Image: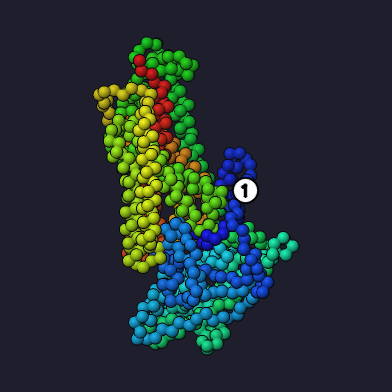
Amino acid sequence: MYVCNKTGTMKTRIDMDFVLVFTLVAFSTCSGFYLPGLAPVSFCEDGKGGDDCQTLIQLFVNRLDSVESVLPYEYDVFDFCKDDNERRPSENLGQVLFGERIETSPYKFYFKKDVKCQELCTKVYTKGKPEDKNMLDFLKRGMQLNYQHHWIVDNMPVTWCYDVEDSQKYCNPGFPIGCLVTTDGRAKDACVINSEFNKKNTFYIFNHVAIKITYHNGEGEGWRGARLVAATLEPKSIKNADDEKPTCEGLPMEVPGEFDSDLKITYTYSVTFEENNDIKWASRWDYILVSMPHTNIQWFSIMNSLVIVLFLSGMVAMIMLRTLHKDIARYNQVDQGDLIKVPSLQGKSISYEDAQEESGWKQVHGDVFRPPRKGMLLSVFLGQGTQIFIMTFITLFLACLGFLSPANRGALMTCSVVLWVLLGTPAGYVSSRLYKTFGGEKWKTNVLLTALLCPGIVFADFFLMNLILWVEGSSAAIPFGTLVAILALWFGISVPLTFVGAYFGFKKPAIEQPVRTNQIPRQIPEQSFFTKPVPGIVMGGILPFGCIFIQLFFILNSIWSHQMYYMFGFLFLVFIILLITCSEATILLCYFHLCAEDYHWWWRSFLTSGFTAVYLFVYAVHYFFSKLQIVGAASTILYFGYTSIMVLIFFLFTGTIGFFACFWFVNKIYSVVKVD
């Protein structure tokens, strides 16, 4: 989740994440940081401004969201005070896809000019008016589902900081509309912060905010004015004795559960300014990030993943250096001169005949490169998987460098979509080259499926989810114009580039196999339970999933619980570990199956690591029922609809990694065998 406007970026330290794992290898200490973006904005007191120094501070509002609903709503949908001269900053593609809707608010104040109990507006709800009842019901529904405001000042989230367990302070980049005391007297959500919120079946709306702006003075540092380094607020519920002259003192503002009389809600705010020259503009996000105690858990995740990698690496090394070496050494004891000869490690040619029965993987040399069934579909999946792999790698690498930091709102999604569109050429090339290697001749069908099959499934799912959002009136519904733009990117850029890649792929000769394929397929002997296809595939996804499940928790939190995600260094490390784990787990299982004389490895190598996506889906189901409080059929459908897109993309990604690792391994070991 991103929590600040795109009109600027930030520079802050990543918590030693991405670089420190390399410390385990290189025994050196490094530090990462977000690269600076646009120049910071300076503010001056009223009357002292100019082109290089602003006096008016404009507060922006974003969509409201909830952990109990997948449906976000625009600020204007709720009956809050609105800006008379409302403006909407231009939004990038990523912001639109994420449903972000930023607009100006009526909260405007001048730098270093404290404001005490300023009235914004008064909303009157008259009994008997259907439109008033509907607006009030929608407001109460928002409080019941704990919908949260998200405000922005100078490209920085306005946070609500409060104490949590162990005397730690947590700074939330959102704050609730209000809260509810249920009919049985139970205080929900934010109602626990005030003992005066105790009336049954009553809502308490936060109609007053006390905003504190912290700034860094530029005197003596070579720049004019001051720069904002923090913006915090405290939401309050206050019923003023006189709505004409509010004092911002009194009992909480109650909204009865039953609308049985006229109701008047007055919205007010206060602003104070505080100087703090210890906080630099470049590190002004640190107080938010430090309050998120994730680092220790992340290091546990990394160490857990490294243990799995070391275990798998040891197994692969044992096979490559011990078992295969032993097989070749056994050949050195056999006389030369039979049909199949294998060069030893010393370069001699050795006999194969007498060692057949002990070395199962060599017995299937004449069938191991027999083209798979459904080779068209496999090549299409591998082309799309290659496209997703390159896109993910570049995106995460740029995020590690800070180009896609949380301060650059929507940049991560925009970068991913643009890269996917531009990477149609590798997809077409890989798909066509492999399809030609499999002996396929329907090249037109191959190209069309590569360009349209998987993207079409994703777009159809996305379109159905968008229809639900549109029916529900959510701000996350993608405008028709944006859908047309996405289709234009797909058919106008990605599809032609896929055709270009396929053209070069089909012009290349088929990949040369190290051994000749027999005309008659070899009969596969009876397999034990663990070397049968399904058990091997199911086991293959366990270890890769074990490397990512902790990181997956934080990713799902950022998507569905609206928490800030900034640990791209850790994510990049986990990505590298996932590559290694998928590759090694697939190679291990592939070797065991070849030793059992089962040469159907093409699809199995793809599905072995691709099965990690099934565990991802199972975890997402567990997360939905155990961690989320989502209610409503629409939100549930949306959750599983978007999760299905994630699972499909992850399936293609991990399956492609496993396939190419196994493809390299099989080519490597059979290049030892020479057929006369």
596 or 147, which is in the foreground? 147
Residue at the (48%, 83%) spot, across then down: 122
Q: Quadrant of residue 114?
A: bottom right
- Whether 639 is drawn above or below 372: the answer is below
- Asked if 22 appears above or below 103 in the picture, the reply is above
Pointer 1 residue = 31
Q: Where residue 526 appears, x then y in whole percent? A: 27, 30
Secondary structure of the residue carrying numbered label 1: loop
Find the residue positioned furthest to the right: 220
* Residue 430 vertical position relative to residue 33 in the rendered view, above or below: above
User: Residue 484 location, x and y as percent?
Assistant: 36, 56
Identify the image quadrant of residue 261: bottom left
Is 170 displayed left or right of 495 in the figure?
right
Question: Which residue of the protein is positioned furthest toward the front in this rendering?
Answer: 51
Q: Is residue 187 visible?
A: no
Which residue is located at x 59 percent, y 45 percent?
Answer: 20
Lateral position of residue 207 relative to residue 503, left or right: right
Could you say which is closer to the camera, residue 18 or residue 326?
A: 18
How many numbered discs? 1
Residue drawn at x 32%, y 46% is: 452
Residue at horizontal 50 percent and vertical 48 percent from the top:
396
Query: Where in the figure is residue 378, as x and y percent of width and height?
Result: 32, 38
Q: Looking at the rendering, which quadrant does residue 586 occupy?
A: top left
Q: What's the residue type where badge 1 is placed? A: Ser
Residue 487 to residue 498: above or below:
below
Q: Nearer the viewer, residue 316 or 428?
A: 428
Q: How is the image coloured?
A: rainbow
Q: State which quarter of the image contains the C terminus.
A: top left
User: Is 135 on the left or on the right of 20, as rendered?
Assistant: left
Is residue 405 in view from this perspective? yes
Q: Give the percent coordinates (x, y) of residue 322.
A: 46, 26
